[in-house]
Image: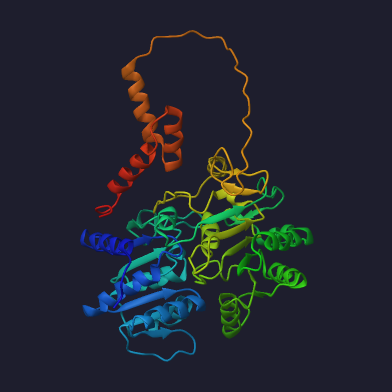
Amino acid sequence: MIELRPYQTHMVHDLRDAYRAGAKSPLLVAPTGSGKTVLFSYVSWKTIARGGRVLILVHRQELLRQTSATLSAFEIGHGLMAPGQPATDDAVQVASVQTLVRRLERLDWTPTLIVVDEAHHTTATTAHGRVLAHFDEARVLGVTATPCRLDGKGLGVEVGGFFDTLIEGPSVAELTKLGFLSPSVVYAPPCAVDLSGVASRGGDFAQDALAEAMDKPSITGDAVLHYRKYCAGQPSIAFCVSVAHAEHVAEAFRAAGFQAASIDGTMDDATRAQRIADLGSGALNVLTSCEIISEGTDIPRVSGAISLRPTQSLALYLQQVGRVLRPFPGKREAVILDHVGNVHRHGLPDDPRQWDLNATKRTKRRREQDEAEVRIRQCEQCYTVHRPAPKCPSCGFVYPVQGREIEQVAGELTRVDPAEIRRLAKREQSEAQSLAELQALAARRGYKPGWAEHVWRSRQQRQRFGGWR
């Protein structure tokens, strides 16, 4: 029997309402650590109880094992479509999407429901998209923490994608308040690393040029020093630019007396699994990686994220910091050591996000505007990054108040038209497209605390199927 948390039950209700309203392929969005695997295991269980068949798509061996372990824990019989795995007649099949694509034409098994894990990878040109196009009669359930793509392509059917409805679960801030995620503290440089000389390719920094810029002894040594200062031997993941960079960082940690290893896609499955297990057991202090553990990997014990890879991708940033937000006994908080200033580009891990299935690629100007709107402050004493406040929540340092000169300018006062003022105020409110913009508007107008949150919740309720119960 699968017991869901209250918010997971709400999400299942929203999903059921979406299907009843005519949706064929909803995309379920919930933060890393919210229990999406448990949720779609529950949906799979209910589907096969009604005589259906479920295909669960994953894109890495680590995710295949984790999904299989969750299904087994709930006593849901299932087969695995992956190299070296025997074929079974189980009504639930967990498939490596790369393996399944090669077998599509000779497969005589047809699902009624396809679950797509890490569904932000799904476009017409990906292996995920080819599978969905092949089984075009099946219902689809996409799940992801980050419904956006690096290349800027939308995931919605209106822009050529596969998903027709967006269902949003609770936010990182809500789950943290409920105790289902750990609070986080971020340390970062005063500003983002200067990468003006690094070219962009495919929507992110060119990896070869970025590796050369970041793989320097001064940067690596700084990572070790700050790990020693703020994480004190706690299990941590270092996110690196390349395989070589990951190994160089691991070497630096080992030279400093820590247990460290790197992991990459060239290793055999057993080695990769063992190193992940060693990090989870505490046998390793630091595991360094280039993308292998950026998505999906569930290691609740890990409490430190060491960011050594600058990225223009909000999705990659959130996936990486999300690795350390899961709670664990004795884990007071997650520590994020952001050596490359990604927090200055994308904001804090628990900032509110506004998702759109039909998003289009941001222009350079829009990206710069988005980055300029990130509202954070960094303590000049302990370097903690936090939301604007009169004092640091970490060390208590009180920021000095900056005096301002009052400037007199030429002009003439005119009579105010109340109707025009109300019209402009209403338009200004409608133009505020995020909770942060509504909060800024409330501050300018001197509104009571909670006004922005109330307006934001009301908007979200209108956009969803029935809202929260």
Q: How is the image coloured?
A: rainbow
Q: Nearer the viewer, residue 366 or 3?
A: 3
Residue 103: x percent and y percent? 42, 83
Q: Describe residue 425's horizontal placement relative to residue 342 as left or right.
A: left
Q: Nearer the viewer, residue 383 or 455?
A: 383
Spot the residue most to the bottom.
86
Residue 70: x percent and y percent? 40, 78
Residue 134: x percent and y percent? 36, 73
Q: In this rendering, does residue 41 appear at all? A: yes
Q: How many marks?
A: 0
**Residue found 56% across the figure and 75% down from its top:** 280
**Residue found 30% across the figure and 63% down from its top:** 6
Q: Quadrant of the C terminus?
A: bottom left
Q: Describe residue 138's horizontal placement relative to residue 439 as left or right.
A: left
Residue 36: x percent and y percent? 39, 67
Q: Describe residue 94's horizontal placement relative to residue 42 as left or right.
A: right
Q: Quadrant of the N terminus?
A: bottom left
Q: Nearer the viewer, residue 84 or 385?
A: 385
**Residue found 69% across the figure and 50% down from its top:** 195
Residue 126 higher or lower than 149, as above or below: below
Q: In this rendering, does residue 434 appear at all? A: no
Residue 65 higher or lower than 412, as above or below: below
> Quarter-wise, where is residue 371 in the image?
top right
